[in-house]
Image (cartoon, coloured by chain):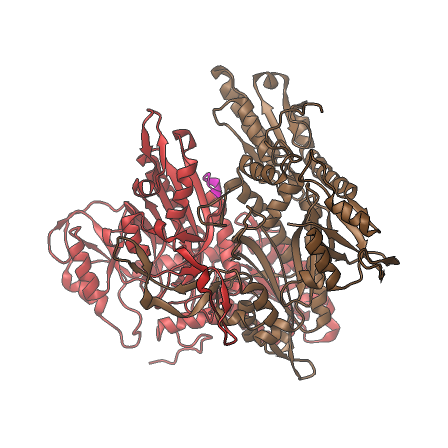
Chain colours: A brown, B red
Amino acid sequence: MSQPAQTAITPRRDQDFPEWYQQVVKAADMAENSEVRGCMVIKPWGYGLWETMQRQLDGMFKATGHKNAYFPLFIPLSYLAKEAEHVEGFAKECAVVTHHRLESDGRGGLRPAPSAELTEPLIVRPTSETIIGASYAKWVQSWRDLPILINQWANVVRWEMRPRVFLRTTEFLWQEGHTAHETAAEALEETNLMLGIYEKFAREHLALPVFTGEKSEGERFPGAVKTLCIEAMVQDRKAIQAGTSHFLGQNFAKASGIQFLSRENQQEHAWTTSWGVSTRLVGTLIMAHADDDGMVLPPRVAPAQIVILPVTPKPETREAVLAAVEQLASDLRAQSYAGEPIRVEVDKRDIGGGQKSWEWIKKGVPIRVEIGPRDLEKGSVAVARRDRGPKEKAFIPTAEFVAQAATTLTEIQQALLDRAIAYREANTLKIDTKEEFYRFFTATNPEKPEIHGGFALAHWNGTREVEDRIKEELKVTIRCIPLDAPEEDGRCILTGEPSRRRVVWAKSY
Amino acid sequence: MSQPAQTAITPRRDQDFPEWYQQVVKAADMAENSEVRGCMVIKPWGYGLWETMQRQLDGMFKATGHKNAYFPLFIPLSYLAKEAEHVEGFAKECAVVTHHRLESDGRGGLRPAPSAELTEPLIVRPTSETIIGASYAKWVQSWRDLPILINQWANVVRWEMRPRVFLRTTEFLWQEGHTAHETAAEALEETNLMLGIYEKFAREHLALPVFTGEKSEGERFPGAVKTLCIEAMVQDRKAIQAGTSHFLGQNFAKASGIQFLSRENQQEHAWTTSWGVSTRLVGTLIMAHADDDGMVLPPRVAPAQIVILPVTPKPETREAVLAAVEQLASDLRAQSYAGEPIRVEVDKRDIGGGQKSWEWIKKGVPIRVEIGPRDLEKGSVAVARRDRGPKEKAFIPTAEFVAQAATTLTEIQQALLDRAIAYREANTLKIDTKEEFYRFFTATNPEKPEIHGGFALAHWNGTREVEDRIKEELKVTIRCIPLDAPEEDGRCILTGEPSRRRVVWAKSY
């Protein structure tokens, strides 16, 4: 076995994927666990990424007629119980507020004041269907009040016993769209529209190819009639559900009393949808694109797309170098990439050039540019791309670099997408026998203990029983029933019963 | 008494100011109370205003070197107790999470599961000094790690017994900056810098003249060494504290253990600051600018600066009118006002023109434009400004209107600021005798029972006793000790003792 090159992250992905992930999050300085169990601190570099994603998604929501609003953090206990399936799914692990005041405990500490116990406990929202439904019930009287197309950016809380930063945290940030419509057809159209936006955002902004499809009954959102999702493959070949769009039928409208007088002068219940993506997307991005040297950011969402590193070995040339750096930063910021001014950071910190360069490699900034006194003389810059080896540098005339910067960012974005597509294709197999299916998900390579399996496209008889058995035996689930898959004769992977369509099976986060 | 003209809002400001405020919030469709006591629902028009303010403030924070991050919603009970004054100020009325799971109560409902009681209760953050301090303590080792310049946009909860939408709600949205510095001087400079940003934002964006100054001891943030604030006057002549910037000295650094190895190789505690504004600014804006016909929005922060109302009386001209409207909207959006593209909304709803126009008046949109078939023929538009009478319309050639739009918005912005300055000046008096002082704050006009008093600039002996007595007798407090007021010999309004400076006294929200 040949000795692999030294990497910035230890362990490597193929040695210990979960630990590699934690180390990348740390090395990229994106987030850390807080002392409050399950809650993370999102550090500026991680939050900057979320802000970029948020701004771009928000633009896509608004371009399709949605407006933002804000609803209460707290949900009265009784609201959760209104929708029967919903309460089963969400009323379990959540933060319960029982008191509204503290008092001295007589031993120098504090305690919840017994006199300030709430008559009805409040739940910190795990999702807002019920509390938003209560408002819509008041706002909607007639078909003229529909559709309501509202989105909310908010924090939500679902108590997690096995938290993992960004992927599964007790508190996380997300957006939740909640819409109400006159007809089932309109609500279904909305559900599909938003799934399309998520797919496009994943592909074009995050460089993530995703499967789109419908969830099976066992994986559906509690209370939904239909849950659509985008599913991404990450580098241990597992799936991550990266966004969902739910057609809620009239279930929540009935539970909340969202009724309207129809065009035919009848009292009817509205048809509602909800859809969301969360800071889980950040974790997905890391697991999908990072490498053994740290984070690799798709340029479109990188908080900084280009970092300029002045090289100032001698005091006498320092001023000239810094002036050139500021000029370059300003020239680059005047360029536009993907419809936004290029985001440039200048790192003037007085630390070693090697350390500085490696910090930005680990943070995943798409392009690093060094300028020193000798580059100044030659009128060129030393350019390194994060999608290539850490030591690969090109020396490019400064003006040319500026003129090409947007093109280079486009190339990097495309390279990451191509790589992710190739990886997913290499690890997505059509499987037709039970034996092969079981081997696919259980065979291990002792040198890469964490990485095996992938996505299996296999036939299924459509029953919950088969799903449950495969889940129990292999920890493998149906990630989605693809929306646009061609019909094809086949036989259920487990029972041999006839089937007309392959579904996507995988282990998942 | 002459009969006043009919107004869109009942009651008028001078009849019942608190009720007028509630009615404006409702008529402008900005927010409403939720069924969760003290928590509001911020509706799209109100939230759109907050988003605009947020984006502009965020730009100002970033331009001064701050980055955003995100810290946990929950604070362990013991953290609150770390800073002695802080615990007194904040540990009282707050939401206390005591359980992390619900279970069936055996009667068809739910209850907090006794088996899932938390060992240590969690507090929903009322402010984040303590939880952020815990992170900074880990991040800071050496003077090279300083300054830390971080801001957070978040929701916070302070249990309110007498809530009032936007002004005082149990949950509200805000930003909280938290910085740590090497020296007291740097931290003081930061405190002043952020106060300056708030003052500039209030004046230039919100058209609100504010007094800036320091809080007296009785009004200081619990745990701060010095609290600076901006104080606005609203139309019942009361004061609203619209933003604060705190110099925290080393108090919180000591409580949280934020220590660093100094340039002199000594372990020292950092010097910290915190500063914030909240959705209370929205309430301030309403109370300061709205009139008896509803909201009046300063153009710079209006979610829509211009609304276009197509007039389509006949089906045969409808298409031509709508085409002209879209063209006009697109021409206006290509114009820039105050560094941003002009924000235009088109209201094509099929409802009566009068009702539609009045809805936008009540929402406070700065410019309304009507286009009908006859305007099309003449190549002109009918333009109404919200800072003028509701029936005042100008007929302006379309191209001219487009070319002047940004100038008109500038004029409206200035008109609102001028009006607010004039109102504040008319109601800010230098007062030198106790008798006059008491009369100023107690005299009432039976026709305007809610509106009396104003800001009194009066001398004070600097003691807490005088403050407390005036607060008790008049419900009047020192709003701030102006930072830049000229020194001047005088005598304390209550005791007659010598004083060197006037301070600002008022009733307040």
Q: Nearer the viewer, residue B468 or A126?
A: A126
Horizontal side of B93 relative to B437 (left or right) equals: right
Quadrant of the rendered image containing residue A197: bottom right
| Percent position of residue A451, x then y | 69, 40
Residue at (54, 47) in percent of width and height: B339
- Which residues are drawn in magenta? B62-68
Residue at (50, 63) in percent of width and height: B46
Say which quadrant the C terminus of chain B sits in: bottom left
Q: Nearer the viewer, residue B429 or B65?
A: B65
Q: Please say whether residue B13 is visible from this viewpoint.
A: no
| Percent position of residue B161, x then y | 34, 67
Q: Please say whether residue B3 is visible from this viewpoint.
A: yes
| Percent position of residue B253, x then y | 33, 40
Say which quadrant the N terminus of chain B sits in: bottom left
Quadrant of the rendered image containing residue A99: bottom left
Residue at (48, 15) in percent of width and height: A316
Up/down of B317 relative to A478, above or below: below
Up/down of B19 relative to A493, above or below: below
Horizontal side of A211 relative to B418 (left or right) equals: right
Horizontal side of B190 relative to A127 (left or right) equals: left
Assess whether residue B273 is covered by the magenta stretch. no
Q: Nearer the viewer, residue B130 or B371?
A: B130
